[in-house]
Amino acid sequence: MPAIVVLGAQWGDEGKGKATDQLATTDPIDFVVRTSGGHNAGHTIVVNGEKYATHLLPSGILTPGATSVIAGGVVVSPEALFRELDGLVARGVEVAGLKVSANAHVIASYHATIDKVTERFLGKNQIGTTGRGIGPAYGDKINRVGVRIADLFDEKILAQKVEAALDLRNQLLTKVYNRRAIEVDAVVEELTSYAERLRPMVCDTSLLLNQALDAGQTVLFEGAQATMLDVDHGTYPFVTSSNPVAGGVCVGAGIGPTRIDRVIGVIKAYTTRVGSGPFPTELFDEDGTKLQQLGGEIGVSTGRTRRCGWYDAVIARYASRVNGLTEFFLTKLDILGAWEQIPVCVAYEIDGQRVDEMPMTQTEFFHAKPVYEYFEGWQSDISDCRSFDDLPKNAQVYVQALEEMSGAKIWGVGVGPGREQTVVVHP
Ligand code: GDP
Ligand code: IMO
Ligand code: MG
């Protein structure tokens, strides 16, 4: 299977790191690639009880023998990149061989500044961003005033680009936000200081990946963020500023859609969300607190408490549709072992009408009330189960029911954070 996409089917933090690690340990993977987003992501993998978190790097950097790639659709903070690499090296992880696209846009410190002041300015309408400068960096890219990795190697060009980018930004900062202007020279100096260390990593990653696919090598595209955070297909404006859906992988990597063989949607056995925006199955009672606590639902990047709710099959079907999922990887089934009865949202009720598919407008989605179907819990610890037959009957029924209502088969189920804590349903 040469090209595999792993992506988030909900609002992020589904366990994409674990799914990537799982695939990379069962089949040999030659390349693990990030194609969108930046260091707003936080992917956790647990190997032999040791926990690792990756942000800008693909979690595949921990897979021996796989080359990690940051493709052109990613927004790269060189400062965050080196901090993350140094952190892994200090823990004895081999990080040599990383490739970074010359086309990737750069996040400089001013992007994070603008991200934070914009959020403050929005007040109660704020998005709840990670404050990493993601939106402003993609904004510059779309406005054609962005700085790309290749620009760091020519100080003259870099100075011109930073000047162009800051021209308008500084007007905004000083006149609207009442802040000090950002100095072009200081930014240029900071960015050029990263150039030498970056240089050996930089290449045409589209060419590299297409050649790898031509040679029959296996490339795993590790999604960041998720379908419902997609700037086009998510809960706009409460989204990130990139396209985490499967289509975004082609754009971000510079590969054609005909290259992709499998698209795996990672989905939790319940739902979580960080930041603002609608969330139909969100719980405000003790079940919500219990999911949050038992699931350890705290953001990997920002340490924020995640909002929690039941599984939403409408979202699963939507994710299956907009990504063309070939399968799901269902995570955190073990967490549900503490309930006698487990509600699953099978449809919405909007203004008195039953709706089975994602509503067309945001207003309708804001008004959507979950229609629940109830499943018997298994009320036991399943973290030592290693095959589908090991799972208690009620857990098997729950997985099969989700599969039937979610629009794609479930190839695997996570029963714990560890690498070995996976049950393969459809090999
Ligand atoms: P990502 O951003 O999609 O990679 O997910 P995060 O790493 O932000 O959040 C997922 C969390 O759930 C991490 O702490 C994982 O270690 C953990 N996790 C993943 N799969 C499972 C699972 O099947 N069971 C349990 N208990 N934890 C899991
Ligand atoms: P992973 O890859 C969960 C959310 C933020 C906010 C919105 C916009 O670990 O699943 P941004 O900083 O991107 O402009 O914030 O998107 N968000 C995430 N939520 N997991 C993530 O990544 C996220 N990356 C961004 O909380 O609501
Ligand atoms: Mg995460």
Image: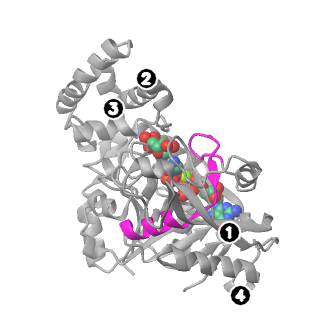
Q: Secondary structure at mark 3?
A: helix
Q: Determine the CA span between mark 4 and mark 1.
A: 15 Å
Q: Secondary structure at mark 2?
A: helix
Q: Earlier in the sequence, mark 4 or mark 2?
A: 2
Q: Which of the 4 image quadrants contains residue 252?
A: bottom left
Q: Secondary structure at mark 4?
A: helix
Please name the residue shown 33% across and 55% down the image: 71
Q: In what quadrant does ligand 1 lie?
A: bottom right
Whether label 2 touches label 1, CB < 8 Å:
no
Q: Determine the CA span between mark 4 and mark 2.
A: 54 Å
Region of the chain picked out in magenta, as a range: 298-323
Tag nearer the camera, 3 or 1: 1
Please name the residue shown 42% across and 73% down the image: 325
Q: Secondary structure at mark 1?
A: helix
Task: Identify the residue position indicated by label 2 in the image.
Answer: 121
Q: Earlier in the sequence, mark 3 or mark 4?
A: 3
Q: Earlier in the sequence, mark 3 or mark 1?
A: 3
